[in-house]
Image (tube, coloured by chain):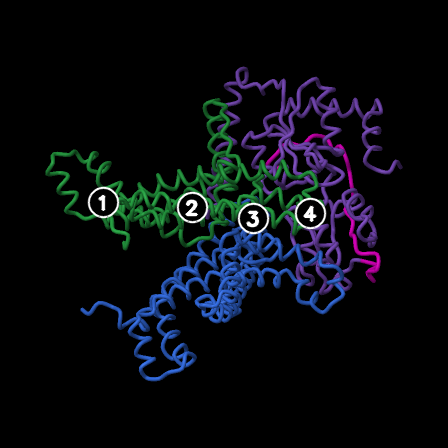
Chain colours: A green, B blue, C purple
Amino acid sequence: MIDLHGYGPRLLEGAGVTLSLALLSLLVAILLGLLTATAKMSRSWVAHRTATLYTTIIRGVPDLVLMMLLFFGGQIGVNIFTDWLYYQFDIDIFININEFVAGVVTIGLIFGAYMGETFRGAFMAVEHGQIEAGKAYGMSNALVFRRIRFPQMMRHALPGLSNNWMVLLKTTALVSVIGLSDMVRIAAEASKATREPFTFMITVALIYLLIASASEWFFARLQKRYDIGYGEAD
Amino acid sequence: MDALMTQLEALLADNSIFTLQTLSYYTEGLTVTVQLVFLSLLIGLVLAVPLAIGRSSKRGWIKWPIFAYTYVFRGTPLLIQLYLIYYGVVFVDGIQETWLWVILEDPFMPALIAFTLNTAAYTTEIFRGAIKSTPKGEIEAARAYGMSTNLMLRRVVLPSAFRRALPAYGNEVIFMLHASAIASVVTIMDLTGAARFVYARFYAPFEAFLFVAAIYLCLTFAILYFFRYLEKKLLAHLQPMS
Amino acid sequence: MCTFKLEIDNEKILTTSLLGLAIAATSAQARDYDEIRIGVDVPYEPMEYRTPDGELTGFDIDLGNALCAEIGIDCEWVVQGWDGIIPGLLSRKYDAIMSSMTINEQRREQVLFSEPYFQPPSAWFAPEGSELTDTTEASLDGLTIGVQRGTLQDNYVTDMFGDVADVNRYSTADDMVLDMEAQRLDIVFLDYPVGQSTLLQSDNRAYKVVGEMVTEPKEYFGDGFGIAFRQRDEALAEQFNEALATLQEDGTYDEIYNRYFDAK
């Protein structure tokens, strides 16, 4: 077996940080993505424009730059605000952007833009006739969304969703640069201390591959579920 | 030129952060980023063509090693690949005494190698998809003309695959531009490196990072329009007739 | 541009704050701390670093704990990367920074410093076999110099040698030492005690100090290391100053010093 020089437990802890960071960011991204898709399809000019601006900017700037901007800049922005509160109203509150929250927000914000595109395409792929049929049955808009639009949209969105998740998972590695102790950072620390970069970097690479393979399997199963009622050939 | 500089100087006179010195860091950073991205894409592209053909081969001993390579490089973060190459080569015994070290000493080279291997893996898969979706009729037509496999590959399969791969490849180019930001982690003064320097020196995150974000945004748009233009020219036959 | 707005805002905050403090002088007393959190950037051997099992140790850590014990408050250490260490203090992620931070004018605008508790010189380190004997502009021409990003050494090297030499900037001193070992760097410039413990005592390669220790000019090298507090926590800073004086008198300071540095 690989000798981890006693860094094993911390590496495992780091893997936990990576995974929870990825899952929480995914949640934020999905919510933002649904919101963006809705805004893009809405008739409101403002909503449409705002959503387009958001996806354009996010997809035009590197993840790392956005992360540093939000992490370092967000901190100072919040400081100015809380100091103002303190001096102005003597309210002493702690708003503390830690690396984990900054990571979740940034990654969620970035992938919300990508998810928005995925969901928009998927919503548009749902046949309009089905929505009309639902309405003809007297279903409310919410019910149409829950029973017809969402499940069918998911079928079309799953390939994109799974793709975004894979990219998101790898993007979490960047939080190590802003100082969060994910598994990449711990592996980097360990390789410097022991002078054995291969041992630790390859271990971490294997963990990433493991998570990626497990996700592939999971998404294949999910796709099967949402494909019920459609021909194999589709 | 001199007149321009004096004008610029006057413009910057009241600004403590964007001085001529910091701006020169940003321009040098821009050069480094463009070089790094352009070279890795170019070499990656050259590598990807034979790899994609091999990946579509029926022979297992050609196909599977290439698959393993693309799977690993696409399944792990680029940052890890960069660390492995940047720190890893150092621990190859005695490498500092060989000619290789002349190349690997500068952080630019390990980064270029990591980026190239990464983009080659993605590009291989893009091309493979495009080769796989070659219409059967095109192949049959080529066969009917009596073309050899090589000739068919050169004259029919590859040109049509390149065209089909164009939109996906455009995304890959933008992806590489953005991914190159991590070069700053191994001391390279690329665009992001310049921004980090300005931030650390002046504690000015908004100025430092917003400015660099705007530059990246412009670069992204330039790439986007370039590929739109290419698509229009090369994929004209696929556009709906108006 | 943005700077302007920020400056104006700060000014406004400052004036209104003076008013506010005058009015609320009784209620806005600095908080009494019964426990404080101290921000630190590791590793920076021997000032602050981790043992393999993750325990924090080093001169700053031991001295900080001794100071807290003297004052009679509980201390908790919070690890924070150097890039974000001052913003972290200002946002109350922790209440003090004790992380080999040099007192200088630029930082004084942001934070309140204790009296200096340590005054290390900076020094140039090169491999034993290096032909360098001084560090003039001519001799460093074309070489690659390593510094830690955002440190006073970075500022000094960038201004003095940025035009003639390549400057490689690292996030941590550790990264820099590793690249020095890898022979990617010709020379590095850092706090002497750190260079002494990471380079001079290294088992991997032999190093030497090039030229004299550097402590001037003051605009770059400041007044030694201080503990940083938020501007308004004057009472807390005063408590630390008193405790520091006590420890320096009763020999505790020397005892901790001898743990990490060669006794002089």
Magenta-highlighted residues? C109-134
Circle 2 crowding by C-alpha within 10 Å: few under 14, some 14–19, many from 20: few
On the question of residue B130 being in view, the answer is yes
Q: Nearer the viewer, residue C62 or A222?
A: A222
Same chain check for tags 4 and 3: yes
Residue at mark 1: chain: A
Q: What residue sits right under mark 2 in the picture?
A: A217
Q: Is residue A126 within the magenta segment? A: no
Query: Which residue is drawn at the image coordinates 80% and 51% (left, top)?
Result: C204
Magenta residues: mostly which secondary structure? loop
Secondary structure, mark 4, is helix
Q: Counting residues from the N terminus, which is met first, the one under dot 1 or under dot 3?
A: 1
Callout 1: 10 Å neighbours few (<14), some, many (20+)?
Answer: few
Find disc 4 in the rendering and name its residue.
Answer: A192
Q: Chain of mark 2?
A: A
Amino acid carrying mark 4 in the image: Lys
Q: State the separation of the CA atoms marked 2 and 3.
A: 16 Å
- Find residue C97 and report its horizontal and vertical position in percent: 65, 33
**Would residue C149 be found to the left or right of residue B168 on screen?**
right
Q: Amino acid at mark 1?
A: Ser
Q: Residue B13's spot in the image, x, y percent? A: 53, 54
For marks 1 and 2, give the CA distance.
Answer: 35 Å
Residue beneath disc 3: A206
If you read the primary sequence from the N terminus, does the residue marked by circle 2 or circle 3 appear first? 3
Between label 4 and label 3, give the one nearer the viewer.
3
Q: Nearer the viewer, residue C254 or B130?
A: B130
The tag on residue A42 is 1
The answer for which chain carries disc 4 is A
